Amino acid sequence: MPQVDFSDTKIAFADKSLAELRRSHLLFSLMNYPWLVKAGTRLATLALQLRLPVEGLVKATIYRQFCGGENIEEARKVIDRLGDSNIKTILDYGVEGKESEADFDRTANYLSRTLEYAREDEDIHIISTKLSGLFRFELLEQVSGGSPLSEAEQEEYERGKARVDRICKAAFESGIGVHVDAEHSWIQGAVDEIAWEMSRRYNKGLPTVINAVQLYRKGRLQFLKDSLADAREHGYLCAVKLVRGAYMEKERERAREMGYPSPIHESLQDTHRAYNEGLKFCIGHIGEVYVCNATHNEESCRYQAELMDKQGLEPGHPLVATAQLYGMSDNLSYNMAKAGFNVEKYLPYGPVREVIPYLIRRTQENTSVEGQMSRELQLISKELKRRREER
Ligand SMILES: Cc1cc2nc3c(=O)[nH]c(=O)nc-3n(C[C@H](O)[C@H](O)[C@H](O)COP(=O)(O)OP(=O)(O)OC[C@H]3O[C@@H](n4cnc5c(N)ncnc54)[C@H](O)[C@@H]3O)c2cc1C
């Protein structure tokens, strides 16, 4: 098994110019101040609501760090560049928070166009989707909570499923995977149900429908086991993307407000433990399971390599991948790719105004915790220092 040196910033940033690194350094330095992130988030949201022309500013700064472009053609340069380092792209049409049937149809059409594009390009082999972009959120919530649907609601639900089916069928016919993102726990019941239904139809040996499992939630190890049991019963490949989970604050807040026990593990250590168990379970069942280790945690990448080694799997085994978000944790992506592992970058694209919720989550994730420099800022600072000393 090749040794992976995650601290090698020379490899991690080999395709970044000095100017690009300096720009990223400035951006992550600003994000390091929680008060600035809070104020900036409010100002940007307000400016966009008031239709003030701030898109140019957002695009030249934070958008450029985390997104590919306003359309697929614009994202092309980034996809090619990742491809040059043996990193595949998970293309995500990053629009969120829509509410009308017309919006859902538009999103489904964009996803179909993304698929057509992916079919022509070997560097894009997965697209990503949030089912809340294809269904009304409240409807998913109703289904998840077990509330009976009226006839009209049932029809609406079937229309949503037809949109998902159209995308999964086209993906299956083109040999492309579809990540079904995990969202808030109170809609996840419906998301899982739909993902299983599509998996039964399309995961015939290849990972077409890849359902995300959030291991910051209690009981998700059992859900993983249930997923494999369903795959065995119906004779399909159980394909999962493991994540810790991105909605912790909201989950805890809702549980507090509504007076039910928090669905999130009590401590970070418990989440890490569950994540490790999940990864071990999946890699232990490779062949019946496909797993994408979607994380920015260095230990989780190291653990993946260790488990694969123990199991006698080649780094490039087709049923194991790791993925990071574009603009983050290049030390993991580029060094894993260099060592021969299957690596993917999650690359959102779409109009600046539409990807703001995604960008806000990224700024919050990169804000300093108790005065420490963020993970990204430390890495970029290290590389800038290395280049200065090299000159
Ligand atoms: C390619 C990719 C795809 C993703 N897709 C999804 C998705 O579909 N759905 C989704 O929800 N997220 C998704 N994420 C985000 C992911 O869930 C995490 O929020 C993010 O990557 C940070 O987790 P990490 O594994 O990098 O771990 P770390 O940075 O080591 O851990 C941070 C995570 O641990 C958990 N945590 C932190 N503090 C506590 C605490 N006190 N108690 C319990 N748990 C705690 C939280 O989940 C937090 O995000 C994705 C991430 C990547 C890289």
Image: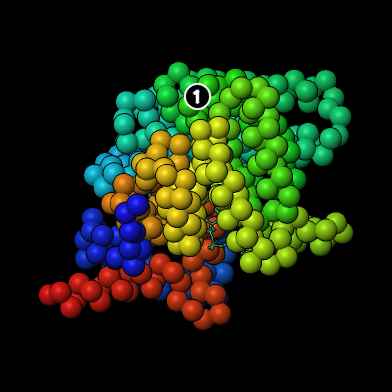
Query: How many dots with numbers?
Result: 1
Label 1: few (<14), some (14–19) or many (≥20) C-alpha neighbours in 10 Å? some
Residue 372 in the image: state x and y as whole percent: 49, 79
From the viewer's perspective, tell me whether residue 116 is left or right of residue 258: left
In this view, which residue lies farthest toward the left?
A: 391
Residue 352 in the image: state x and y as whole percent: 44, 48
Residue at 73% in and 50% down:
219
Residue at 83% in and 20% down:
151
| Label 1 sits on residue | 205
Residue 158 in the image: state x and y as whole percent: 70, 21
Residue at 25% in and 76% down:
385
Residue at 56% in and 69% down:
38
Q: Is residue 234 visible from the viewing direction of this image?
A: yes
Up-down relation of residue 235 to residue 143 (above or below): above
Depth check: 258 or 49 in front? 258
Depth check: 14 or 359 in front? 14
Residue 76 sits in quarter: top left
From the viewer's perspective, tell me whether residue 7 is left or right of residue 162: left
The picture quadrant for ligand 1 comes to bottom right
- Give the position of the C terminus as an image quadrant: bottom left
Q: Amino acid at mark 1?
A: Gly
Q: Is residue 36 visible from the viewing direction of this image?
A: no
Depth check: 99 or 142 in front? 142
From the viewer's perspective, tell me whether residue 276 is left or right of residue 187: left
Up-down relation of residue 386 to residue 329 (above or below): below
Residue 287 in the image: state x and y as whole percent: 51, 33
Colouring rule applied to residues? rainbow
Depth check: 345 or 300 in front? 300
Q: Identify the element where label 1 is drawn.
A: loop
In this view, which residue lies farthest toward the bottom?
A: 371
Up-down relation of residue 380 to residue 186 (above or below): below
